[in-house]
Image (cartoon, grey):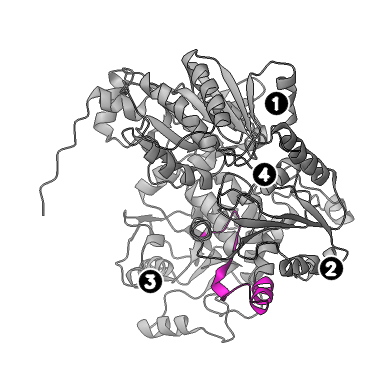
Amino acid sequence: MQCLWCHEQIMHETSWKNLLLLDGKALLCQECKSKMEVLSGKCCSRCSRITNEEVCSDCRWWEKQSVEDPLMFNHSVFNYNAFMQELIAKWKYRGDYFLGNAFKEPFVKSFRKKFTFLEKNAIAVPIPLSTKRLTERAFNQAQMLADFLPIETCAILSRKHGEKQSKKTRYERIFTKNPFAINETINNPVVLVDDIYTTGTTLRHAASLLKEHGCTRVYACTLVRG
Amino acid sequence: MQPKKAPPDFTNQQLAKRFSGKLLLRNEIPLNEALFQKLCSANLFTPSKSIKRKKLSNQCQRCNNQKQSLFAAIPCQSCKKTHLYCRNCIEMGRVMECEALYLWSGEAPIWPSLEDPCSWIGKLTNVQQQAANRIVNAIRNKEKELLIWAVCGAGKTEMLYPGISEALMQGKRICIATPRADVVRELLPRIKSAFSSTEVAALYGGSPDKDATAQIIISTTHQLLRYKEAFDVLIIDEIDAFPYHADQSLPFAANRSKASSNTTIYLTATPRSEHQKQIRQKKLPHIFVPVRFHGKPLPVPLFKMCFDLRKELKSYKPPTAFLKWLDHRKNPKRRLLVFVPTIKLADKMKDNLTQILIDKQILSSNDSLCAVHATDPDRKEKVELFREKKIEVLLTTTILERGVTFPSVDVAVLDAGHIVFDEAALVQISGRAGRSPDDPTGEVLFFHDGKTDAMVEAKNSIISMNKRGGFS
């Protein structure tokens, strides 16, 4: 088995643990794996941003914007370091679908740890791509992440075509109109799933739409905190 | 609002120039869907399968990848089926089983035949002229292959001019392929000014000219993956260089890009053993150019033992022997090109070295030392600054081992015994010194903590090339 990223041969260590638990195959080599930086320690409790404060300045700003922030909190698994940027660029923009499987194990593990309180009827909702972008990329990276999770996935949102988020400035991102539409109403608690949390606007647009249509609580679980 | 412009109508000849000889994905053909469909139904574009499924393996039709680990399945939202895509050439745009590769099958492009295409006014030395004549003959007689073995700084590019002129006079299409994007960028202005009435295009990852319609193409070997039966004359620079000899798909791409009657010219200063063997067995015609264009011998590297090298490098400090040498350089006015084996070392040693050099008054300011490596986004600019003598010291990994010319430098290799410095790399690195006729010598020092075979062989091979060049 070769590392999905650097194509070096992966050396498997045989231990009692992976012998007895039949661990899944490692997709990345140890060295590449070690370059992925799991967020831990001092992070904002609302958005996972690295900070010493309990709630970061961005999230306090969001709180002032409306009576109630539509998003309970966002949980991100990784820091958006240079290596993560390269990985995500290849996965998402070059379209190397299979590379996404490298995130499965840490993503699920982190989700289970953070969302222990979640009811059984909770539903994962991936942030959608516009039809045009979906045909271009051939897969939705958020859908792939949502499918990893141990709860049911429902793709109930759709998106009108627009400029790529990553091409916009911070100001443009925060003050854009809600680009989403809802196809089906549900009143279960929802975990929104996306690859990157940058300003939090996208997720809040989706969250407020879900709440308007009867969702009780909306959380977010994202791969990286941008 | 301005009224929308009608789509420009292309003549078949224009389209032929743009698309003939290329094997492209639909999204690499910048034509609107209506026009594209029209061209397809007129059989001007022929689609072909992008991934062939065989009994036991699959094969990417663009990069020839046949390794099963470099194919993966994708549940495609575009065609709603799960199928394969190629992970090997994905940096060039994803090849998916549900999308075809398109080949131009319309009329052949007609390139102008010029009477006197070469606008270069320099003069070749006798030795260069001999090699140049040999190349002209090879092209005139449609010989298949010719290897030019020329020492670093022999003036390989200039030697090509008469051959390129000959090809242009016959209305042929020419490609100069080289493994590194830096070299493509360096060659472009030189070739442009040498053939000012011919169109020249440069292709490398991220190059502005994607749609190269020119008669002369300067390209990285990777970009050849988009060509099929295109070039009458293919010149492969640095045939021995990584990644050409390491990545199987590159020789495949080079081979496919040749037109049916083609002349291929290989250039190298340090032929790999398989080529040397072919030369000895007289299976590969070759010509040897043992003298630099300014007529002076190649600088022979000096070995300097550093007992504390491991310790010093561990704390990212330059070796003591290196600092000692700095005080006793023959010509302290020369600028310094320092090679280190790893990116990490280049990055981390930068600040230490800057401080020491400022204390020694070799550097005037913090900005006159730069570190570059393959993943450095500013590498283009830094190399340019060093070439223009705007910075004094350049700390680099092996990415600058070949193809680049800096006037008047001394060269130091720190940890020359490291595995990345093989014989060819060390010969090439030594060849960076003494390239300018105003200052045709330069010091080359290998700092090491134990001689390796590669170092000894590199030194011997430089000495023997000097001997063949008539120096003793």
* SS state under label 4: helix
**Which residues lie in the magenta part?**
B351-378
List x then y, in percent, for residue B193: 37, 40
Residue type marked 4: Gln
* SS state under label 1: helix
- Between tags 4 and 1, which lies in front? 4
In primary-sequence order, the first of circles 1 and 2 is 1
* SS state under label 3: helix
List x then y, in percent, for residue A140: 47, 50
Residue at mark 4 to residue at mark 3: CA–CA distance: 47 Å
Query: Residue at 42% across / 22% down in the picture?
Result: B166
- Residues B191 and B209: in front is B191
- Between tags 3 and 1, which lies in front? 1
In primary-sequence order, the first of circles 4 and 2 is 2
List x then y, in percent, for residue A203: 43, 67
Rate crowding at label 3 as few (under 14), some (14 to 19) or many (20 or more) other CA atoms within 10 Å.
Answer: few
| Residue at the spot of label 2 | B311
Residue at mark 4 to residue at mark 1: CA–CA distance: 17 Å
Rate crowding at label 2 as few (under 14), some (14 to 19) or many (20 or more) other CA atoms within 10 Å.
Answer: few
Mark 2 and mark 3 in contact? Answer it, CB < 8 Å: no
Q: Chain of mark 1?
A: B
